[in-house]
Amino acid sequence: MATILTLAGDGIGPEIMTQAIDVLNAVNDKFALNLTLESGLIGGVAIDATGVPLPDETLARARAADAVLLGAVGGPKWDGIERSKRPERGLLKIRGELGLFANLRVAKLYPQLANASSIKPEIISGLDLLIVRELTGGIYFGEPRGIRTLDNGGQQGYNTMVYSTSEIQRIGKVAFELAKTRAAATGSAAKVCSVDKANVLEVTELWKQTMIEMQQAEYGNVALSHMYADNACMQLIKDPKQFDVMVTGNMFGDILSDEAAMLTGSIGMLPSASLDASGKGMYEPCHGSAPDIAGQDKANPLATILSVAMMLRYTFKQETAAQAIEQAVSDVLDDGLRTLDILDPSEAGLTQVGCQQMGQAVLAKL
Amino acid sequence: MATILTLAGDGIGPEIMTQAIDVLNAVNDKFALNLTLESGLIGGVAIDATGVPLPDETLARARAADAVLLGAVGGPKWDGIERSKRPERGLLKIRGELGLFANLRVAKLYPQLANASSIKPEIISGLDLLIVRELTGGIYFGEPRGIRTLDNGGQQGYNTMVYSTSEIQRIGKVAFELAKTRAAATGSAAKVCSVDKANVLEVTELWKQTMIEMQQAEYGNVALSHMYADNACMQLIKDPKQFDVMVTGNMFGDILSDEAAMLTGSIGMLPSASLDASGKGMYEPCHGSAPDIAGQDKANPLATILSVAMMLRYTFKQETAAQAIEQAVSDVLDDGLRTLDILDPSEAGLTQVGCQQMGQAVLAKL
Ligand SMILES: CC(C)[C@H](C(=O)O)[C@@H](O)C(=O)O
Ligand SMILES: CC(C)[C@H](C(=O)O)[C@@H](O)C(=O)O
């Protein structure tokens, strides 16, 4: 028996989570997975209830659980709060406390949604790119940090971007191994592009050097390339299919993974996994809490539902169940069902649906 | 009489500079500008000649000059050099030493080149976006920085992202003022989008707060919005025309300005200005040194030629001469002349030309 902690969070979090839980319960029955679900508080709702964005109780239950399914956190309601207590801090804290250093974000083009992108179809058709983002280090967690008052009366803000060899090796290994797995599955050559700004930042010079040493010592069969972050941001637009696995630090990964997601035109479709060293993980959609449409039954639940599939694959090694969910999602798209974010008004034969209807349609396919 | 220091640099630098100098000499005569040109060494060629990427002599002449025109620096030849001596350090040092804190990069779509972009035409047609990047602070210059050996024998790299209120105000003022100028020219409302990651980084929280205070105190007629860097990177793809002026720090600016340039599909066309507090400036193309095509007469000289136009506008207040150059560039595009980087093979009536032919065609139009 295994336990999953669900944390719906804020904004559209509760709506999308309801649908994902229905799907999770359905596969749990169908494949006799013996999973138990619990729920807890994080983000703004946790602040409202307990005063902090990640209550100790939630953290304790997350530690005890085998996996966490997260909706989304944050919203204007909590923007004015003192910074150490904001919803985002709860998210950063749970990542750090659970040691979820490996964030996997897939930017995959669903052929049914090819027109939703701003990018010309020939540039992105068939896109299937994995970004491996380091998630518990770098400038997100580096000390010292803060805002201090200067002698002249002005203020100064400062943060520290820091990585050690062992942190870089740990995430490098995840990227190299996943590149091998992906290559084996498709019969293509394994390749990793490491993104840095080694021409300016010493910390990323160490990053680059460490990746080179790992490749030479252990991953001779994986082609390793390097790209500066500014160029990577350009190349993702110019020719995203040149990449297979990209690996980078926390901040560049934040930016590049969002960019890659947007290339597909369907960020409402993209799941993510954040894993610790043992394979335990937190799973969440790449999109945010979208407070502007919260509670209106307009949100797209598919990224959260696909996050359930990732959870079954990575934490519970239930590939068949994972694929069943992915197939069901593909089927509802084939049927022409679209939430607002992925609806192309110029395309014939589509049906606009709400969050609930979309979730229940996936359920019906299972 | 005023002096311009030209620094051709590495890779395609010398080829594009030759064409830009021809154009500069031509407008100098035509508009009786009384400009004197000197040349100096920077980057890899300076390393080869003197051992350092920014010789003291170059720096002294740059200080004495009224403006600097730069080609590009760097290339694989100097990648193995100890980091304090690499070509890029010369570029960073001249920016810092001359106090060129305001980097202006325009992402403008040339209608003649609309097809060169990866982005669908309707998303980018008419795009004309100004990115104001802080250029002498932030993590590029912050101390402490370096790579140290840890007790466990591993290494640790670290950099510091730091901004003070006065640095933020200085660049904020440039952005607000330019937004007003642009709005006055087009008859539209002035707006600035400030990009930060205030939900995670204290230093950018101070950035955001300072922008808010400035707007409230002095720029009530400029609409100020805020966006997180990851979202800005997405929004640039989804709907770049929502922006007019964006202002951000050194590192986010590096990434976002390259992204914005690539949206137009014609980074070979985009000039930039780096200004100090008095309007003195260094002007350079947004693209790099492109070592792969150096010396082959394939480079696009137009970004450097358009950098000359920016120089005439911002440092020498010669709007007529600046516009003459811009018109000449537009005319050669109308004539169908294209260097390889902006050639659309599917379009009829175009003539592929080399760097020299392109430069001379602009000259002939003047
Ligand atoms: C909400 C925010 C703190 C977070 C991050 O920057 O990591 C988000 O943008 C993400 O990518 O998951
Ligand atoms: C060459 C490099 C140091 C430079 C930078 O990062 O500033 C370049 O990318 C730029 O944007 O001018």
Image (cartoon, coloured by chain):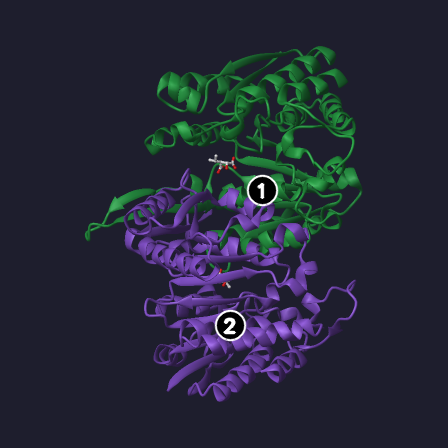
Chain colours: A purple, B green
In this view, B322 is above or below B112: above
Q: Position of residue B123 (x, y in %)?
A: 72, 50
Camera-near label (2 vs 1) is 2
Image quadrant assignment for residue A279: bottom left
In this view, B250 is above or below A315: above
Q: Position of residue A292 (x, y in %)?
A: 66, 69
Does dot 1 land on a helix, a strand or a loop? helix
How would you rate the neighbour count of disc 2 (Cα within 10 Å): few for under 14, some for 14-19, many for 20 or more? Answer: many
Q: Position of residue B225 (x, y in %)?
A: 64, 54
Which residue was labeled with disc 2?
A307
**In front of the other: A198 or B283:** A198
Queried on whether the Cβ of the residue with tag 1 lies below 8 angstroms from ligand 2, the answer reads yes
Instruction: Identify the chain of the residue marked 1, using the numbered disc in the image.
Output: B
Does dot 2 land on a helix, a strand or a loop? helix
Q: Residue at x 72, y 23 (%)?
A: B325
Q: How many marks?
A: 2
Which residue was labeled with disc 1?
B257
Mark-to-mark CA distance, 2 and 1 = 33 Å
Identify the amino acid type marked 1. Ser
Can the viewer see residue A46? Answer: no
Residues at marks 2 and 1, common chain? no
In this view, A338 is above or below A356: above
Q: Residue at x 46, y 43 (%)?
A: A227
Image quadrant assignment for residue B133: top right
